[in-house]
Amino acid sequence: MANATPLDTWTPTSWQQKHTLQQPTYRDAQALERTVTALAKLPPLVVSWEIDALRERLAQAGRGEAFILQGGDCAESLEACSSDRIVSQLKILLQMSLVLTNGLKRPVIRVGRLAGQYAKPRSADTETREGVTLPCYRGDIVNLAPFDAVSREPDPALLLRGYERAALTLNFVRSLVDGGFTDLHHPEYWDLDFMRHSPLYEEYRKITDSLADSLTFFEHATGRAMADTQRIDFYASHEGLHLHYEQAQTRYIQRRAAWYNLSTHLPWVGVRTAGLADGHVEYFRGIANPVAVKVGPSSDADYLQGLCRILNPENIPGRLTLIHRLGAKDVDAKLPGLIAAVRAAGANVVWICDAMHGNTESTKSGLKTRRFDNILKELESAFRIHAQMGSILGGVHLEMTGDNVTECTGGARGLSDEDLARAYVSTVDPRLNYEQALEVALRISRWQDHR
Ligand code: PEP
Ligand code: CO
């Protein structure tokens, strides 16, 4: 078990004794307490055997036997919890995973940034506009984005609304997966309406056609239908930022003799809250889920080794994933040192490259964007560096959507800064649109020599 060592002082609330960053300030502490109590009584969103299964799958990715595709919105919104959005998110993840499986010749583990990706770290507690100062927007589970005093007041009831939306999202995803939507015989179910006009459609279609041929061949050769031999699974993840929310969903599972966070399969700690002595690392060390931590350009060897010691003292494969997000400009200089530090400690980690968060910039008009070329450049460097060092890049982490938004520049259609205004929807970070996301998968699968 991930936490079989005596955890001395750990409890689901022990993080409260530590310095904890990025938590909202609620005016009514008792209302928060009541909400956390209510949340703790509600049924879990995921179950321990799914969580344990994911840890095994992540261990495979760490050994190069599988590849993780983790992607979704920067922030989900309560309002956007709709059938269309969930279906298109699932479709693009399925399309990408098919392209990646075909190119990398490895099974792909699909992990959505969904059903709980509602809390966001911010650079300041407050925001001032035209002389008016209000609390900053911290994600829909905390407060609402419009700049007025009522919307911006942190409201504990939103924790329950977020939990309910997460349950609705997962319920729908599970039904789609069980109902045959993910059946490999029918990749045409995943076509997005606007896809046929994409410059990438031809290349994608060729892959699905050749997959259909291989499936038929396999089924004729073995006399067994593929559906009987391979189930597509789908996992959920989110940043475990709001620790009252995470704590409320933390349950002791007698059979496993361990505490699990049952709000998601794979929670991660963001780069801004991952101090070794701080509340988030304290909370994460005690749960049996596989956990991930984002690491940035300022993470040094001591820090990484400390993370491995605290979060994975028994060095269990699949327990700890490090998601490096260094940016195209720092990846060459920094990544080799990170890999070497982990290796020197003899630590088992799964490496994932987040090619988004080190590449954020602002346009002249002040819009946050990311250049497609920088995202690709970081990914390509990450594959190359891991391969050169005899390490394994186990997956990618992307902010993306199945919708036709214009938030990142570049890609097959060469979106420019001016195009961004057309369909910029994100309230926080810019996402790849469906075409850019598919292009990332196609490009990765062409880098055969980096494996
Ligand atoms: C995120 O994943 O949306 C995020 C805030 O990332 P990071 O912690 O890497 O900045
Ligand atoms: Co983000």
Image (cartoon, rainbow, N blue to C red):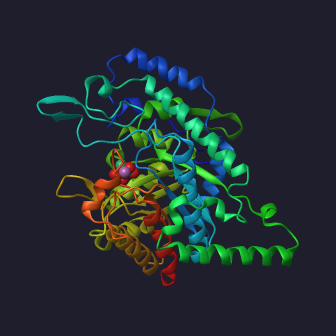
Q: Residue furthest left?
A: 131
Is 353 positioned to the left or the right of 152 in the image?
right
Point 55% across, 76% down: residue: 202
**Residue 157 image offset from top left, x and y in percent:** 45, 23
**Residue 61 image offset from top left, x and y in percent:** 57, 65
Camera sees residue 35: yes
Point 55% across, 65% down: residue: 96
Is 45 positioned to the left or the right of 122 in the image?
right
Instruction: Name the one closer to the observer, 180 or 188.
Output: 188
Point 45% across, 59% down: residue: 397
Q: Give the vertical position of 314 relative to 279 (above or below).
A: below
Q: Give the vertical position of 315 relative to 45 (above or below).
A: below
**Residue 334 image offset from top left, x and y in percent:** 31, 68
Point 73% across, 77% down: residue: 214
Instruction: Name the one closer to the observer, 178 or 303.
Output: 178
Is 399 positioned to the left or the right of 44 in the image?
left
Q: Give the number of marks.
A: 0
**Residue 181 image offset from top left, x and y in percent:** 69, 55
